[in-house]
Amino acid sequence: MTRNIKELSLEELAGWLSLRGEPPYRAKQIFQWLYRKGVASFAAMSDLSKNLRAALESSFTISRPRVARLARAADGTRKFLFELADGSRIESVLIPAELGERLTLCISSQVGCGMGCAFCATATLGLKRGLDAHEIVDQVLEARRMLADAAQSGEPQSTITNIVFMGMGEPLHNYHEVVRAVGVLTADWGVGFSPRRITVSTVGLVPQMTRLLGDTRVNLAVSLSGTTDEVRSRLMPINRKYRLTTLLDACRGLPLPRRKRITFEYVMLSGRNDSLEDAHRLATLLRGIPSKVNLIPFNPFPGSGFASTELPAIEAFRAALLRQGVHTTIRESRGRDIQAACGQLAGDVSAGGDVPYLRNFAPKAAPG
């Protein structure tokens, strides 16, 4: 069987080329064709010799996940349902900012998730497996390809500006492959994305958090969603292993570059973690940590048993944090009508059979 060329490191590909009398710099050329230009065939690599292209064709394949569904929300959010080579399915979400200055791609790192967070639909699937690095990177390549196709069809040209590991799975539970993927995404021979534009979100796997900031220059986001061990342990079972004191002491000790902050994500659950007392406790917990808080309205899914805090109460919670000097924002929920909002990724991934590719699954919002 031929091997997927995206499974190779730069050094491995350079070694393969060397055995065939090719200079090592060809490895960067080949990867730039794959990751910068997004080609899907070796024949398209026009600056390589015919013999080298033939050798690549006989030795390797170029992976591409199948787009089983592309759904479009009224607010412009698009959700991809990808089918991988083994039949596993994952979801990714392309999220435009309301004012159009950002286009964020939310990508998955695992098939399912084993962390068991009570407010997340992905947790209902359990963990199936971690994604390989190329399966993570392919989500970016396919989203970029879709945008290029849309521009050719007359839609405004748009470019992905931010990548967030906040889709299906716990990124730091698949540490090695996530770091490999970040390497490809940020390399000059790879996608060429700035690490300042990449954020990795975690439930709080303490040892891996420290490693991540040593191994990469990405941004870190920590899902908190509780201000006492009792509440957080009910919502997020990882808290039974890494209690709040352990987690936050680790955050204080992280080697953050100057002017960089940790984002703490806080899902607002009505009557569970949204009191003003919670806001005061949260401000106290975060003292001494360069941080900002992102309040996330809970996005419902079947059987969750939770309700989202009403917006006036979320705003009061934010005001209480601001009064105590905590930089705080409220995340706008986008893509709810296609189950693409934060915490909702699970709806289609267990469905069987062939699902049509729907380029415009939902109509665009009407002007005004």
Image (cartoon, grey):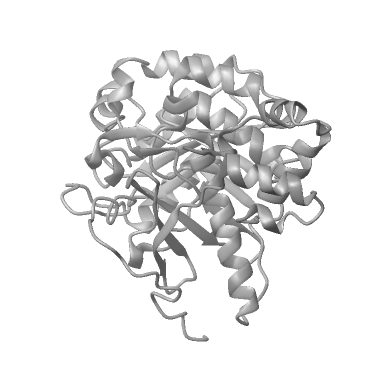
Q: Is residue 45 left or right of residue 210?
A: right
Q: Is residue 116 left or right of residue 212?
A: left
For the point 46% across and 32% down, the residue is 171
For the point 50% across and 52% down, the residue is 64
Above or below, 208 against 120 in this view is: above
Q: Quadrant of residue 19?
A: top right
Say how many tags the image has: 0
Outermost residue, bottom side? 367
Above or below, 119 against 210 in this view is: below
Q: Position of residue 177 (x, y in %)?
A: 51, 29
Q: Position of residue 56 (x, y in %)?
A: 65, 43
Q: Quadrant of residue 278?
A: top left
For the point 50% across and 39% down, the residue is 321
Q: Position of residue 31 (x, y in %)?
A: 70, 43
For the point 52% across and 86% down, the residue is 367
Residue nearest the observer in this picture, 39 or 260: 39
Above or below, 178 against 214 in this view is: below
Residue nearest the observer in this picture, 53 or 334: 53
Above or below, 282 against 6 in this view is: above
Can residue 125 be seen in the rendering of this structure? yes
